[in-house]
Amino acid sequence: MKRKDQISGVFWLLVAGITIQQSLELKIGNFHSPGPGYIPLMIGMGLAVVSVLILLRATFLTGNQMLSLGVPGSAWKKLGLVLASLFLYAFLFPSLGFVASTFLFLILLLKGVEPQRWSTTVLWSAGITLFAYLLFVVILRSELPQGLLGI
Amino acid sequence: MDILASLWQGFQIALLPTNIALCFMGALLGTLIGVLPGIGPVATISILIPITMGMAPVSAIIMLSGIYYGAMYGGSTTSILVNLPGEAASVVTCFDGYQMALQGRAGPALGIAAFGSFIAGTLGIVGLMFLALPMAQFALKFGPPEYFGVMFLGLTMVCFLSRGSLLKSILMVFVGLILAYVGMDSVSGDIRLSLNSILLWDGIGLMPLIMGLFGVSEVLLSLEQPILREILEVKGWKKLLPSRQDWKESAGPMARGGILGFLLGVLPGGGTVLSTFASYSLEKRLSKNPEQFGKGAIAGVAGPETANNAASSGSFITLFILGIPPNVVMATLLGAMMIHGIQPGPLFLKESPQVFWGVVASMYLGNIMLLLLNLPFIGLWVKVLRVPYRLLFPLILLLTLVGVYTVRNKPFDLVLLGVFGLLGYLMKKFEYEPAPLVLAFILGDQIEMALRQSLIIFSGSFKPFLAHPIAAVSISVGVFILVSPLLPFLGLGKKIAEKAASLEE
């Protein structure tokens, strides 16, 4: 139990707060006939209690320790890039279409996270995009957005 | 012999050429994806669910059973060959399996894992067959209070069996429940916990949650280190058949593991994981050469693998007959079935017997496929594992993305995927276990429904709960489990679970 727990304790307490606030916007009812907001409210309060307990335990029961997540410095950049790529994909996906978004996504990852040579990057990205296209669009006929180029 | 007649009918459906082909495809794809490091059975099944869309329900389930067995076996393969467990239940296989691989005995390790799984699966399905009817009768007596009791017990057990702080696992359950309640309330029709955003009106999808928490977060974790993946020079994988000596050493562990696993698997909570650790510990105790364990004792692979599969079969019972998924993998299968309009539960057997027996037959089929498939195809899996991770991970992420999108066709789900990926990653860093969250999420609606109905039926007081013995007992045991760490001599139970968990560190 370290500083980590204090941070996470506060985080979950905030989540609990939001939950409680949102639940109060609904009909609560009472114990005899619970409304839609009843159980979320109870759970929200439960979450608040448990997060406070964790916070207290971290603060009072163990000695101070440095916050250490065990993540080497360079890794944060990589993680950020991967997540950014994911979110970017989610945003561009509907407008650019499946094929284009996939290709860009792969290039971004292969060049950005563990940089490969351009030849490897382009070939591998193209290969996977093609494979994905065949599998999902042609064979499985999944409904995936078509982009500007109609693919 | 009603059962045999029904089973025969089930087989007639399962053995249609189309269905056999589907099962084979499912097992192939399941193993292929399951073998990828970082993608465990849950993620594998989730990715492949969209493939089953548009099929007749029985065919879809048949394919899913192939996928399921494939995914489980893929996980074992990765454990043995690369020392990367695909999920908690494969951790134990890593101990001795990987050692055997390093000694050039990957073949027999993989072979015994396959055979053990097959034997356990077969016996387990037999058990399922015979227990189905009696249990269904029993389950028909279940009303809302009983359901609530069993689900409550299941959640407390998952908390208890999870590594790390019980308090944090309880917190995870609360978070899971909250996430489940986002969206429309089935009773009143109100939109709840939506943060006034239309994006959340449909609630939070199961796929983005699971894929994010288990799949994406794994990729993020793997990327922390400069990517050195020991591409194992797998020697001796061509000779897959375990030797006579191997069989001799494995027979006992397999038998014991099978029974142990089956019993533990029926319990809601942590059946598969617990059974592997329990079997390993048991075999180490009973062995004439306990010092061999951890150095490549085949009993250390045979026992847990059999136990794992037996536990799965046991958990199928709880899934099919009670309709309650006892662990995350079963929950994912439940999600898949519901997408196809199949609702497991006590009425399942009664109202759709042909689907039920078709499913049982397909499980036999899937199990056989597993054996036939994996022994000859092992070369393929080895090749897959040879691809460097830095090239593999974009593929894994892409599969995750497409897999998530094709379930609800909502771009927002992709955003959720990223969010849960980050959350899963942070949770691992801050020492929170995802399993209780996911199980609570899946049970969330059912548990609320059961509780609300119970409260209404009983006009809000808790007394009538006591008139329902099953409910009362389940709830009492659950509460007892929760407070047990506070009682020093009973904290022993938690310590045992933690000791087991620490074996993996």
Image (tube, coloured by chain):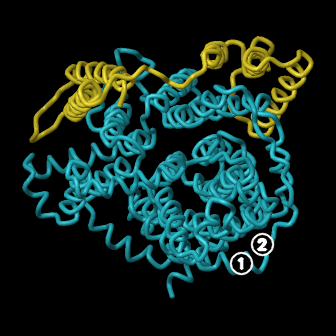
Residue at the spot 22% in from the left edge and 65% down from the top edge: B470
Task: Measuring from the top left, give residue B489's x and y in whole percent.
Answer: 23, 58
Answer whether residue B294 is visible to the viewer in this image: yes
Which chain letter matches label 1?
A: B
* Mark 2 in CB contact with mark 1 (< 8 angstroms): yes
What is chain A's hue in the picture? yellow
Q: Residue B415, relative to residue B212: is it above or below?
A: above
Q: Secondary structure at mark 1?
A: helix
Q: Which amino acid type corresponds to the residue marked 1 in the rendered image?
A: Trp
Task: Please provide percent x and percent y for residue B304.
Answer: 58, 64
Q: Nearer the viewer, residue B260 or B353?
A: B260
User: How far is mark 2 from mark 1, CA to CA?
Assistant: 7 Å
Q: Which residue is at 21% across, 44% downward?
A: B452
Query: A28 left or right of B124?
Result: left
Side of B108 where B367 appears, left or right:
left
The residue that label 2 is drawn on is B242
Q: Residue at x 31, y 50 (%)?
A: B156
Q: Colour of chain B?
A: cyan
Q: Say what secondary structure mark 2 lies in.
A: loop
In percent of width and height, residue B271 lies at 45, 59
Q: How many numbered callouts?
A: 2
Dot 2 or dot 1: first in sequence order is: 2
- Amino acid beneath label 2: Pro
